[in-house]
Amino acid sequence: MVRVALDAMGGDQGVAEAVEGAAALSREERPVQVLLVGELDAIRAALEDQRYDPRWLQIIPATGCVGMAEKPRAALDSMPNCSINVAAKLVRDGEADALVSAGHTGATILAASDHFERLPGIRRTALAAVYPTEQRHGPRGDPFALMLDVGATLNATAEDLVSFAVMGSAYAKIISDNPDPRVALLSNGTEPNKGTPNIVGAHAILSQMSTVNFAGNVEGLDIPRGTVDVIVCEGFLGNVVLKMLEGVSEVVADLARDAYARKFLWRLGLTMLSQGIRQLRGMTDWKQYGGAPVLGFDRVVIKAHGRSNARAIRNAVKVAAKAVDRGLSEQIRAGLAPLNDRK
Amino acid sequence: MVRVALDAMGGDQGVAEAVEGAAALSREERPVQVLLVGELDAIRAALEDQRYDPRWLQIIPATGCVGMAEKPRAALDSMPNCSINVAAKLVRDGEADALVSAGHTGATILAASDHFERLPGIRRTALAAVYPTEQRHGPRGDPFALMLDVGATLNATAEDLVSFAVMGSAYAKIISDNPDPRVALLSNGTEPNKGTPNIVGAHAILSQMSTVNFAGNVEGLDIPRGTVDVIVCEGFLGNVVLKMLEGVSEVVADLARDAYARKFLWRLGLTMLSQGIRQLRGMTDWKQYGGAPVLGFDRVVIKAHGRSNARAIRNAVKVAAKAVDRGLSEQIRAGLAPLNDRK
């Protein structure tokens, strides 16, 4: 039975959504042991509104929570018993197997970095994001692809990019049931010599590695197309690209709303199209699809979106349990073996 | 009367489209003197199919043309009299005021770099792209914003980014009739300390400059929203982002086509919506809107899209003439004065 420490306080939606997600999970056929970490009274009050199976829920008290606008280092230091710190310590001490939080991204990564070790051969961690694409991936026909890093490591060396490729490949194997995910570097051209020196260097190393199904470089065009299963880039680039995808979905939705308001015939057309539009919006609204893994630590860490509702929290906990169950860390270690052996 | 040297050979659509564009322009009320540079026989043959005013067209013979798949340095060196070399030399020697090409982007920038000087204070040149946004910009209510660099300079120093900001501002003033364009740096957060060291450094310099209306940092979300008039970034990032915008438009169009094919009700809805969809596609198809300026040289250089048709070529020549007429180089010099004076 996998045990997940859930920071119940951090999300924008407050403790009620986190508790509702955990309660719903406890009633499922294959529940996960969830340690709800946060203010005792708040969690107890939220639980009173829920039906849940008490065997799978446990409350671990914590004091305070890092707010979205706080500086993470100062907040963690001034609140040693805040929810994310307590949750991370539970995982460090072996009382839980994975950490899940919908709170402050920087604070989550920093708490993990304070309490966990990095896997051998990993110099920098990476935050990975799942995003929708036009093509279907893997044997399950998953429309989602993975991109990393999207903000944990602004500048990455060639070796960092290679370790991101290995970690992304391991995560895609486990979560998307894709036995051999195609991994590519994001660059300004497909030729091996295209890009900044770290990309050219990573290309040379990855071309020689048997543990990653390396597809070479892809370009910006290939991101929404979904040409490959895993796209690797520096955190700065990944962050800009991911936020831009979010902006594009908003603009498309706005344009549709605008068309709706303007013309009767368009309105009629849009009403008829509503099912299709809902489907399109679902495809571009990646927030509902579980959490983003923070990769590189010897423990499983899943960062759920700040705006996660109960369903998103439940999905993030499930993803964390699956990553533990299927041995994410061991997969990453195996993928890195050719590099670590070389040293 | 502005004279434009047009590389008539380089575009994917061949010499006929370039000649048709120039011919159409010669019949307008305010024509531009166009020097058609390329194979004499091919241009003459193409002109036979056109109505044109011979006062505004002149043929300048050249031998050969850089193909899209060629290495630009080797191609330019082995073909000293190819169309882009001859056209650039005409501008260098003062026989024309601006260079326009729909050919190989790298070869266009390299030919300009071989034959023109950079403006004082400009260390690296930038390729700027016009792209559609949700908001309207400037007093004309232009839905387009400018992004630079999108591929001329992969890595830029803080000073390079500042010079890109000045050049982008000058170009937006002239081409979009926007007297005071808002200029921002693309980063992973809006705070002044967010981003890579070159961005943080550029932010500090731009905050002190009176010649640029600096709006601080913007994020990926702001690109499609059109929060500002000019977005400044390194060429590597700009290239990935621009190609991604292109990919997103393609995917939206594909999804609409797919919906059309699948369901009768959707099909009916889409037919009714067709006017709206055309408008959306027009907004995301920036290829039809003139050319991309190569900024930083002491001469005006406009790179038209490789797939330019006659109308796009004509627009690119008009944009070049407008940039000359309104003193683009002088505007850039004036904008850089605070920096050059400091040295």
Image (cartoon, coloured by chain):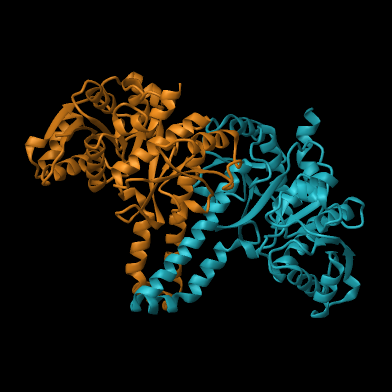
Chain colours: A orange, B cyan
Write down the quadrant of residue B306 in the picture. Answer: bottom right
Q: Where is residue A173 in the image (x, y as percent from the top left)?
A: 32, 43
- Whether B265 is drawn above or below B157: the answer is below
Residue B70 in view of the camera: yes
Count of labels in the image: 0
The residue at 68%/45% (across/down) is B152
Asked if residue A65 is positioned above or below residue B31 in the image, the reply reads: above
Which residue lies at the image location 19% right of the left edge and 43% below the top edge? A21
Q: Where in the figure is residue B14, as x and y percent of width and height?
A: 73, 68
The answer to which of B234 and B12 lies nearer the viewer is B12
In front of the other: B34 or B145: B34
Please state if B140 lies on the left or on the right of B120 as rendered: left
Q: Where is residue B27 in the image (x, y as percent from the top left)?
A: 82, 76
**Nearer to the camera, A166 or B316:** A166
**A213 up-or-down from A162: above or below:** below
Left or right, A182 with respect to B136, comes to left
Question: Which residue occupies 37% across, 59% down?
Answer: A281
Q: Where residue B239 sits in the image (x, y, percent)?
A: 60, 48
Q: Quadrant of the N terminus of chain B?
A: bottom right
In the displayed structure image, the side of residue A259 where residue B286 appears, left or right: right
**Relative to the observer, which residue lies in front, B65 or A4?**
B65
Q: Is residue B190 in sight in this rendering?
A: no
